[in-house]
């Protein structure tokens, strides 16, 4: 399959295009852009900076990728936006390059679905199979685990971590870290249980889900002991359960944002 470039589009002579790339009308592709095999830019797409888009990704009209970050500390340092393969990036999405304060890279994994108006700020690290609904917004340095779902109109504070398989309810403001497999919602987001639907869709065995629920109940039963004591209790009770230990490790890692807890 040959590369196709619409005559109304500008593609820098130094941009690197894979096999079968399709660039529709009125696109602008900068000097240091790399497009993988079969990437399709529909129309009115601007890709600039040191930006890489992985194979089989589809970018819809009026998307802006790889431009300078919205950070007052940014001083023009060379930084990157790296987007994995097979992503669907819908209308008016913006993804910015990294900064010196975040290892000079913003990274998006594979198989993502980013709906209209999504914003991914500088230095974010996004896992694989992530879904972000319309106008969900990530501040700088946010980390999102694999298979997380972020609802429409959600705002995530900078430096927040969102664990694997977590789901964020629409219109939530997320100011604190969200443990893996959790469900959070609310104007100021609170933990509201496990993402049971996501766990079932992920084909986790029922016995494993039941153990996750028991561990969750111990961790967030605030009447029994301190959170630190409950974390120790769960770690000692379920050392052979990797998903539970993933939650424990997540909760004990250093973080500047604290932990999202039940109301």
Image: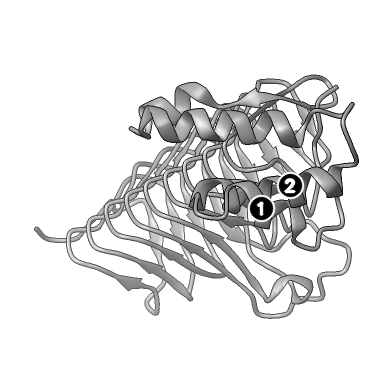
- Helix, strand or loop at label 1? It is helix
In which quadrant of the rendered image does the C terminus lie?
top right
Q: Residue furthest front?
A: 237
Point out residue 176 in the picture as x, y percentages from the top left corner.
Answer: 81, 42
Along the viewing direction, whichever of 146 and 229 lies nearer the viewer: 229
Q: Residue at x 52, y 44 (%)?
A: 63
Q: Residue at x 60, y 43 (%)?
A: 180
In which quadrant of the rendered image does the N terminus lie?
bottom left
- Residue 249 is left or right of residue 115, and the answer is right
- Helix, strand or loop at label 2? It is helix
Along the viewing direction, whichever of 134 and 217 lies nearer the viewer: 217
Point out residue 36 in the picture as x, y percentages from the top left corner.
Answer: 30, 64
| 185 is higher (above) or lower (below) than 234 | above
| 73 is higher (above) or lower (below) than 139 | below
Q: How is the image coloured?
A: one colour
Q: Is residue 224 visible?
A: yes
- Which disc is residue 236 wearing? 1
Q: Residue at x 73, y 58 (%)?
A: 141
- Which disc is residue 233 wearing? 2
Along the viewing direction, whichever of 98 and 262 lies nearer the viewer: 262
Q: Are marks 2 and 1 in contact (CB under 8 Å)?
A: yes
Q: Residue at x 73, y 47 (%)?
A: 233
């Amino acid at each position: 399959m040959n590369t196709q470039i619409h005559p109304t589009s500008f593609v820098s002579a130094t941009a690197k295009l894979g096999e079968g790339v399709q660039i529709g009308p009125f696109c602008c592709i900068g000097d240091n852009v790399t497009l993988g095999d079969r990437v399709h830019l529909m129309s009115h797409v601007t890709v600039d900076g040191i930006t890489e888009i992985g194979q089989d990704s589809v970018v819809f009209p009026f998307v802006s990728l790889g431009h300078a970050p919205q950070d007052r500390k940014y001083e023009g340092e060379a930084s990157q936006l790296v987007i994995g393969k097979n992503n669907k990036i819908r209308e008016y999405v913006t993804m910015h390059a990294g900064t010196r304060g975040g290892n000079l890279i913003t990274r998006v994994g594979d198989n993502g679905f980013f709906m209209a108006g999504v914003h991914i700020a500088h230095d974010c690290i996004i896992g694989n199979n992530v879904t972000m609904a319309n106008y969900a917004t990530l501040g700088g340095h946010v980390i999102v685990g694999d298979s997380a779902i972020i609802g429409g109109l959600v705002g995530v504070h900078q430096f927040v971590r969102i664990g694997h398989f977590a789901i964020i309810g629409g219109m939530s403001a997320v100011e604190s870290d969200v443990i893996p497999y959790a469900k959070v919602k609310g104007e100021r987001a609170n933990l509201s249980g496990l993402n049971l639907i996501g766990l079932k869709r992920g084909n986790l065995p029922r016995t494993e889900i039941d153990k996750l629920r028991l561990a969750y109940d111990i961790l967030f039963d605030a009447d029994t002991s301190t959170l630190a004591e409950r974390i120790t209790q769960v770690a000692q009770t379920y050392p052979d359960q990797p998903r539970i230990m993933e939650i424990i490790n997540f909760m004990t890692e250093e973080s500047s944002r604290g932990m999202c807890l039940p109301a």
